Image: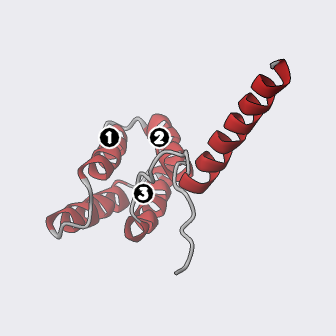
């Protein structure tokens, strides 16, 4: 009886592990592929402490949002980082943009 319970438990765990691998258990991507280059541009503007470049990134973000190419959560991430940089909190903004950039998952070509 005890061996049967152990086998059932191991089998159940194996099914859960396989399901997680097949379905995926990571959090959804925070930025769409078309906006990942904007993250890099924003990081460059922040690391260089160039407000002109920062404003250009913000303009691109606003244009893309108007075109429906930026999700609300994605927009909020960008805006929070831009707000830090506008307050000259360059170090904090850089930490956040790096965190945002690292949160992205590579996109497999179709």
Q: Nearer the viewer, residue 33 or 8?
A: 8
Q: Say left or right for 52 vs 42.
A: left
Q: Which residue is mark 3?
A: 42
**Separation of residues labelled 1 and 3 (CA atoms):** 12 Å
Residues under numbered marks 2 and 3 in contact, where contact means CB atoms less than 8 Å apart: no
Mark 2, other Cα within 10 Å: few <14 / some 14–19 / many ≥20 = some
**Furthest-top residue in this view:** 2
Residues under numbered marks 1 and 2 in contact, where contact means CB atoms less than 8 Å apart: yes
- Residue in the picture at 30% in, 64% down: 56
**Residue 87 location in percent, x, y?**
31, 36
**Separation of residues labelled 1 and 2 (CA atoms):** 9 Å
Report helix, strand or loop for mark 1: helix
**Residue 47 location in percent, x, y?**
51, 51
Q: Which residue is mark 2?
A: 96
Mark 3, other Cα within 10 Å: few <14 / some 14–19 / many ≥20 = many
**Furthest-left residue in this view:** 66
**Separation of residues labelled 2 and 3 (CA atoms):** 11 Å
Q: Vertically, is 80 above or below 64? A: above
**Residue 46 location in percent, x, y?**
45, 51
Report helix, strand or loop for mark 3: helix
Q: Which residue is mark 1?
A: 80
Front position among marks 1 and 3: 1
Q: Nearer the viewer, residue 43 or 88?
A: 43
**Residue 55 location in percent, x, y?**
28, 58
Q: Say left or right for 64 vs 53.
A: left
Occupied quadrant, residue 86: top left
Mark 1 or mark 3, earlier in chain? 3
The label number, if any, that marks residue 25 in the structure image: none
- Residue in the picture at 47% in, 34% down: 92
Q: Vertically, is 98 above or below 12? A: below
- Residue in the picture at 19% in, 66% down: 68
**Furthest-bottom residue in this view:** 110
């Amino acid at each position: 009886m005890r061996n049967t319970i152990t086998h059932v438990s191991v089998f159940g765990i194996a099914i859960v592990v396989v399901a997680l691998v097949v379905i995926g258990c990571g959090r959804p991507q925070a930025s769409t592929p078309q906006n990942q280059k904007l993250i890099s541009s924003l990081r460059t503007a922040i690391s260089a402490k160039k407000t002109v470049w920062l404003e250009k990134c913000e303009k691109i973000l606003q244009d893309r949002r108007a075109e429906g190419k930026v999700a609300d959560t994605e927009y909020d991430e960008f805006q929070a980082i831009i707000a830090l940089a506008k307050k000259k909190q360059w170090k904090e903004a850089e930490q956040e943009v790096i965190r945002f950039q690292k949160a992205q998952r590579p996109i497999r070509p179709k």
